Image (spheres, rainbow, N blue to C red):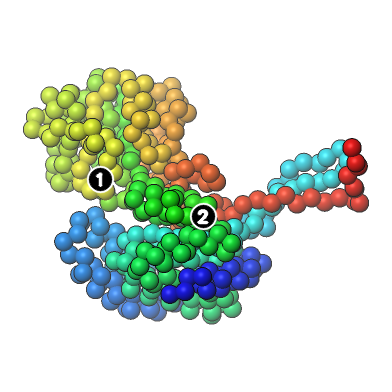
Amino acid sequence: MNVERLAREAKEASRVLAKASTARKNRALRAMGKALRRRSGAVLRANAAEVAAASGRSAAFVDRLTLTPARLEGVARALEDVASLPDPVGTTRPFARRPNGLVIDRMRVPLGVVAVIYESRPGVTADAVGLCLKSGNAAILRGGKEAVRSNAAIAAALREGLKAAGLPPASVGFVDDPDRAAVKRLLRLDSLIDLVIPRGGPALTRAVREESLIPVLAHDKGLCHTYIDAKADLAMAGKVAFNAKAERPGVCNAMETLLVHRAVAGRFLPAMARQYAKAGVELRGCQETRRILKGVKAATATDWDTEYLDLILSVKVVGSLDEAVAHIARHGSGLAECIVTKDPKAAARFLREVDAGAVYHNASTRFTDGGEFGLGAEMGISTQKLHARGPVALEGLTCEKFVVSGTGQVRASR
């Protein structure tokens, strides 16, 4: 595949998208949703073959790879949801009125061409395109080889929808070459591509950062913690901690480490362990946890830094809020962290001091998601600080330019 040609075509398409009206972009999004439903049989057949070929992989991997009719319908609806969101492109905000009469505003504009490199989650194909389109960007997609047929079928439906709405099908470029050399060539095209977003594990993110000449917005690992404070409502804590781990363990906003204050550990952990056992969750505990819960496997130093993406949970008893915050600072990935407490001062400290894209008080980290935040489908959850952080949706796919209005002012020489 000629990725250079794909990128050039996407660049040309991005100029059309940048000036497309909100109404036209919304028509395209709805048309893409309809096309995805029309092609659902082809998409699901391709996906079923890939799921069958993945036998022997972990349950979490297969879950990420699998499309069901309900999940595919959810993907189509997500495109329509993006159509209902406010368009950030062209919005302005006042910045300054200078003493010489110049009026300076800031205007949101598209980035241009966004390349998304992801692994085994085919729903990302449509989510990424929907967000790029609404924010006026062209998208180049390269999914994992395990889902290449599913992704190709989805991309074909999306291009069909674009064409029906009168927008260039080249707005969606899909790299179907499984050779890593194609990705390396793509990451060198800094004159044609404006941003690269890797969505996958740490190895993928590291590889993209090492190879890319293009700015990278990383969707890195999600090593999320839930801290049960000494003044927690333990019934609430049980609900939050169970949901954060067991509701869907193979996603980045699932909890990987449970921190429990020593004052409540003896009461909280036995009941929690019974709940987790029923759900098939394996616990790995610190020495104090293992004194409370007999037979629990010992947590190693590596466990505190492991994103399991599976029904495995590290458990640590801590003596204070300070110890919990320090543990998160050492081992967290900056995606999402939670405190469960009835103490407003402890909650305020946690929310202020913990460094993450999303911090929670008395709610599951599983809400860290563009849809749950009202942003529509998300491009990913950025764990870095430039230029976007947390769930990245429409605004995160734009930047601002200065718009300066005058009445003939000229700058005097000095």
- The residue sitting at 64% across, 57% down in the picture is 109
Say whether marks 1 and 2 touch (CB < 8 Å): no
Left or right side of 334 for 388: right
Residues packed near mark 2 inside 10 Å, few (<14), some (14 to 19) or many (20 plus): some
Left or right side of 340 for 187: right
- The residue sitting at 32% across, 66% down in the picture is 145
Q: Which of labels 1 and 2 is toward the front?
A: 2
State whether residue 39 is above or below residue 409: below
Q: Identify the secondary structure beneath mark 2.
A: loop
Q: Quadrant of the C terminus?
A: top right
The answer to which image quadrant residue 242 occupies is top left
Q: Callout 2, which amino acid?
A: Leu
Q: Residue 108 appears at what percent x and percent y?
A: 65, 54
Residue at the limit of the structure toward the left, as seen here: 295
Q: Callout 1, which amino acid?
A: Tyr
Please give the label number shown on residue 213. Answer: 2
Q: CA distance from mark 1 to mark 2?
A: 31 Å
**In-front residue for pair 3/174:** 3
- The residue sitting at 32% across, 61% down in the picture is 120
Left or right side of 88 for 293: left
Q: Identify the secondary structure beneath mark 1.
A: loop
- The residue sitting at 16% across, 61% down in the picture is 56
State whether residue 4 is above or below residue 353: below
Q: Which residue is mark 1?
A: 308
Q: Residue 107 appears at what percent x and percent y?
A: 69, 52
Instruction: Tell me if I can see residue 338 in this picture.
Output: yes
Q: Residue 246 appears at what percent x and percent y?
A: 24, 46
